[in-house]
Image (cartoon, grey):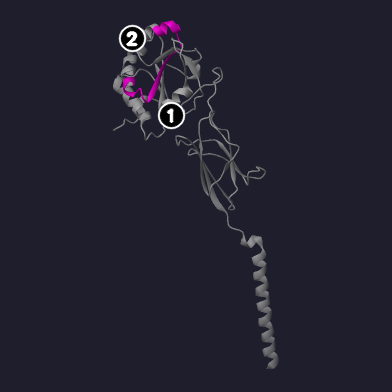
C-alpha cells in the first residue's frame, strides 16, 4: 500500500516537472511568442487627393533598402495591401510614376495605413519634341512672350492664381473669334482667381496677334506660340480650351467653341472654389455646375 502511494507521488512529481519544462521551452521559443502577421495598406495620391494608379510600390524592412518584403502595382485607388510581421521600420519606395512629381528615396510607413501625398515636381522647361500631354498630367513649366515683350511663366501664374486657362486659337478661325467675347466677359468676373492665355500656334505673327487684341480690346493675355504646342497639347480642333488647376494638373480638355458667357462661367467656377476637389473632365459639359 505504501509502495503504491509512493509510486503515485513520483508520477505526480514527474508530471509537474515535465509540464514546467514544456512551458519554459514554449516561453523561450520565438516561434511560439512572435506576433502574428498584420495587414498594411499604402495609398499614393497627388495634392488634389487624386489616386495615382499603376505606380510600382516596393516595401523594405527598413531604410537600408536591403531586404525587400513586398512589391506590387497600385490599383485604381492608388493602393496596395500586404501582410507582414508588425514593425515600425518598414519603408516604401515608389517608381514608374507619371512625369512631373517629387519623389523621395523612400517613405516611412506610419502604422498599418499610410497615405503618401506627392506634389508637382520643381517645374522645369518642357522638351516640346518629346512631351505629349494628356488629361491628368502634371504640366511642366513653360514660358510665352506677349507681343509687348512680357514673359509669362506657368510657375509664376500658379503662385498667384487658382487655375490657368489655355485657349488655343488662330487668326483665321471664325469659331475662335466668336468665342473670345464670352471669354472676355467671363475673365472680367474671375480675373482675381484665374489667368487666361490665348495662344496661337498656327498662323500669323506676334504683331498680327497684338493688332487683333488691340482692335478688339481683349484684356486677357494673348500671344503667338511655337507650332510644336499643337502636338504637345494634342490639339485636334480649334478652339481648344485646357485648364490647369492649382495643383499643376491638366483637369479639362474641351475641344470646340463655348456657346456663351455662362458656359465659360460655369466651366471656370468649379476650379476656383475654396472647397475644390480635383477631378478630370473631357469636356466643359461634364463639369458639375456650382449652386453657390
Residue 119: image tag = none
* Left or right placement of residue 112 versus residue 27 in this view: left
Q: Classify 147 as above or below 276.
A: above
Residue 16 placement, left or right of 214: right
Q: How many marks?
A: 2
The residue beneath circle 2 is 216
Percent of width and height locating residue 272: 37, 29
Tell me the element at label 2. helix
Q: Nearer the viewer, residue 16 or 265?
A: 265
Q: Is residue 193 magenta?
A: yes
Q: Is residue 257 left or right of residue 51?
A: left
Residue 178 position, x and y percent, is 33, 13
Q: Which residue is mark 1?
A: 246
Residue 291 pos. (x, y %): 29, 33
What's the distance in space between the residues labelled 1 and 2, CA to CA? 30 Å
- Residues in magenta? 187-210
Amino acid at each position: 500500500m505504501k509502495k503504491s502511494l509512493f509510486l503515485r507521488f513520483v508520477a505526480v512529481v514527474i508530471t509537474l516537472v515535465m509540464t514546467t519544462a514544456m512551458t519554459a521551452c514554449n516561453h523561450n521559443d520565438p516561434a511560439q511568442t512572435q506576433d502574428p502577421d498584420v495587414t498594411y495598406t499604402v495609398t499614393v495620391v497627388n495634392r488634389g487627393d487624386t489616386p495615382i494608379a499603376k505606380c510600382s510600390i516596393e516595401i523594405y524592412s527598413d531604410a537600408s533598402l536591403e531586404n525587400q518584403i513586398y512589391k506590387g502595382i497600385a490599383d485604381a485607388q492608388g493602393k496596395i495591401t500586404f501582410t507582414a510581421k508588425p514593425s515600425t521600420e518598414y519603408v516604401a519606395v515608389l517608381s514608374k510614376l507619371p512625369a512631373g512629381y517629387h519623389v523621395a528615396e523612400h517613405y516611412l510607413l506610419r502604422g498599418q495605413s499610410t497615405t503618401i501625398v506627392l506634389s508637382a515636381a520643381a517645374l522645369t522647361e518642357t522638351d516640346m519634341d518629346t512631351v505629349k500631354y494628356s488629361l491628368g498630367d502634371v504640366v511642366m513649366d513653360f514660358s510665352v512672350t506677349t507681343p509687348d515683350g512680357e514673359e509669362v511663366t506657368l510657375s509664376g501664374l500658379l503662385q498667384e492664381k487658382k487655375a490657368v486657362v489655355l485657349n488655343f486659337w488662330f487668326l483665321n478661325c471664325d469659331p475662335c473669334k466668336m468665342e473670345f467675347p464670352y471669354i472676355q466677359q467671363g475673365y472680367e468676373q474671375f480675373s482675381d482667381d484665374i489667368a487666361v492665355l490665348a495662344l496661337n500656334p498656327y498662323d500669323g505673327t506676334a504683331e498680327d496677334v497684338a493688332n487683333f487684341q488691340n482692335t478688339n480690346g481683349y484684356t486677357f493675355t494673348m500671344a503667338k506660340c511655337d507650332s510644336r504646342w499643337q502636338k504637345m497639347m494634342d490639339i485636334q480642333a480649334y478652339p481648344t480650351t485646357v485648364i490647369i488647376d492649382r495643383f499643376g494638373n491638366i483637369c479639362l480638355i474641351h475641344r470646340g467653341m463655348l456657346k456663351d458667357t455662362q458656359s465659360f462661367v460655369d466651366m471656370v467656377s468649379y476650379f476656383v472654389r475654396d472647397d475644390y476637389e480635383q477631378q478630370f473632365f473631357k469636356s466643359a459639359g461634364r463639369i458639375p455646375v456650382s449652386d453657390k
